[in-house]
Amino acid sequence: MRWIAPALAGLAATLACTASAEAASPWYVEGGLGGYFRDSESSSNTFHRNATPNVNVSGVDTLKFNPGLIANVGVGYRLTSHLRIEAEAGYFTYTGHTLNPYTSAPGYPALNGQTFTRRSGDRWSRYSGTVNAYYDFTPIAGRFTPYVGGGVGASADHRTNGRYKSAGGQIFTTPGGTSTQGFGLVEGGVSIAVSPHWAVVPTYRYMHCFAVGEDSAHVGQIRLRYSF
């Protein structure tokens, strides 16, 4: 029976090595939900009015947005103890809030920069894909791992027609459409380990789209990460 103790010790060592190997897997998956806060935008525009003949005049409008929602899922791989890369897919949606159109062309007294408030429509829906790289700092107290990083990607966008109304009752409509655009992002956050495999990750992200108007946004998110 003397062999039992060495055998149990060997089995324990084998299980420990197996568990260690599993914990050391470089792969992880994560998903998150949060708020999408697009910055207001002022840009040149062409205002169209149905008439005989149709009329188009140049002007400037300023558009402000309601906060929206964003959801992401990602698959990551740890290259080193500090460096990791990640492929991510996302969806975010938001609406316009107020619109201030202005033109110096005669015959458009309502387009004097006054505020029109959204009544319906003017919703953006965006599907995105990115490739990101992150740097993890040395953990604090064994559980808190701050990180920074960035990435590039593209989105497929859809905007619905919108209807806005001024305090005086004038109606202004905005056109819908579809488009694609590239964007870049920078991000910071902290991974909070709650078990050997699970972590909660609060994040902040700044996004900037390389398109007409060059819209940008701030994103706050809570993610749940599982490391294999």
Image (tube, grey):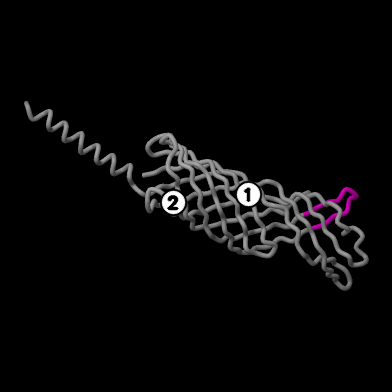
Residue 7 horizontal side relative to residue 81, left or right:
left
Residue 75, label in figure: 2
Instruction: Say how many tags the image has.
Output: 2
Residue 179 horizontal side relative to residue 188, left or right:
right
Q: Is residue 183 magenta?
A: no
Q: How many neighbours does mark 2 have within 10 angstroms: few (below 14), some (14-19), or many (20 or more)?
A: some
Quarter residue 203 falls in = top right
Q: Secondary structure at mark 1?
A: strand
Quarter residue 183 falls in = bottom right
Q: Secondary structure at mark 2?
A: strand
Quarter residue 49 falls in = bottom right
Residue 167 position within the rendered picture, expressed as x and y whole percent measured from the top left: 88, 48
Q: Which residues are magenta?
A: 163-173
Q: Residue at point 63% right, 48% down?
A: 36
The secondary structure that most of the magenta stretch takes on is: strand
Write down the residue under mark 1: 218
Pick whichever of labels 1 and 2 is earlier in the sequence.
2
Residue 52 position within the rendered picture, expressed as x and y whole percent measured from the top left: 89, 72
Q: Amino acid at mark 1?
A: His
Outermost residue toward the top?
1
